[in-house]
Amino acid sequence: MLINDLGIIIKELWITHPTDRYSTFLAKFISKYKFKNVLEIGTGTGIVSICLAKNGSKVTATDIDKKIIDLAQENAKLNNVKIKLIVSDLYENVKGRYDCIVFSIPYILSKKRYNYINFLYDKFMPEVIESRLTYMIDNSIIGRLISRDRWNKLKYLLKSSKDYLNKNRFIYLVVFKSDIKIIKRFDNIAYSIIEFPFVTSQCIVKISYKN
């Protein structure tokens, strides 16, 4: 699959989320900046890390599944870039400090593997319908129940990331707008919101630590 806007080739497999408008926009947005070294959590196909590496950054990328890491490695080779790839759940196997950390948080965090049904839904569901369904679920009682695991992961991420950032550096998170209330609870965090240029219940949040 050739992504003309980015000039890269991405191979997709059902084991991870397909390349979509969110990941493509994030890759274009963040690769405009030059970072000495970057950590991407949950790299998936590797699209964001590949764009950063092509722009000259030293990139480390993680995912929780070895098969997904193998796919990202294959995509890195297809695009002639080097990325350090690690099997890790968030910071579990991560070492060192970075100028930027990137993470697109999945709506539902599950111990079950991504499967064909997930892939087909994410790949072929019309974007307008997908956005509307996510918005309706997110603002319901069911949405609050299924978001608990994601919010716990987000809290852990916000508490822990400072230990993996160089001084005066920052994080780019793709979150759901209902997640903003979690970010607001952290007094030591400064944040700004970057809206996607299309209708969606998600946004990019740039986060830095005050002290």
Image: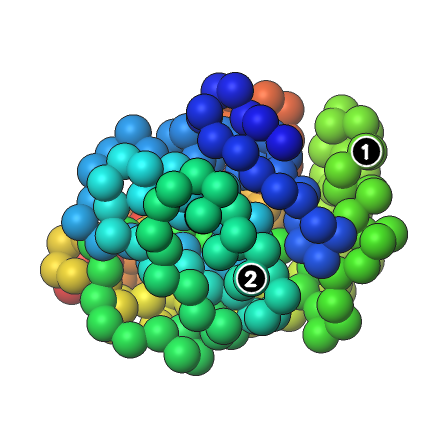
Position of residue 9 relative to residue 60, above or below, is: above
Q: Amino acid at mark 2?
A: Asp
Place of residue 61 in the rendered image (x, y in percent of width and height, measured from the top left): 41, 59
- Disc 2 designates what residue? 70
Specify whether residue 186 is in view.
no
Q: What is the C-alpha distance between the residues marked 1 and 2?
A: 24 Å
Q: How many marks?
A: 2
Going 53% across and 52% down the picture, which residue do you hit? 74
| Secondary structure beneath label 1 | helix
Tell me the tag on residue 124: 1
Between disc 1 and disc 2, the foreground one is 2
Place of residue 208 in the rendered image (x, y in percent of width and height, measured from the top left): 26, 52
Going 14% across and 54% down the picture, which residue do you hit? 168
Left or right relative to 24: residue 144:
right
Position of residue 146 relative to residue 159, above or below, is: above
Place of residue 169 in the rendered image (x, y in percent of width and height, measured from the top left): 19, 53
Quadrant (top left, top right, bottom left, bottom right) of the N terminus: top right
Place of residue 40 in the rendered image (x, y in percent of width and height, measured from the top left): 40, 55
Of labels 1 and 2, earlier in sequence is 2
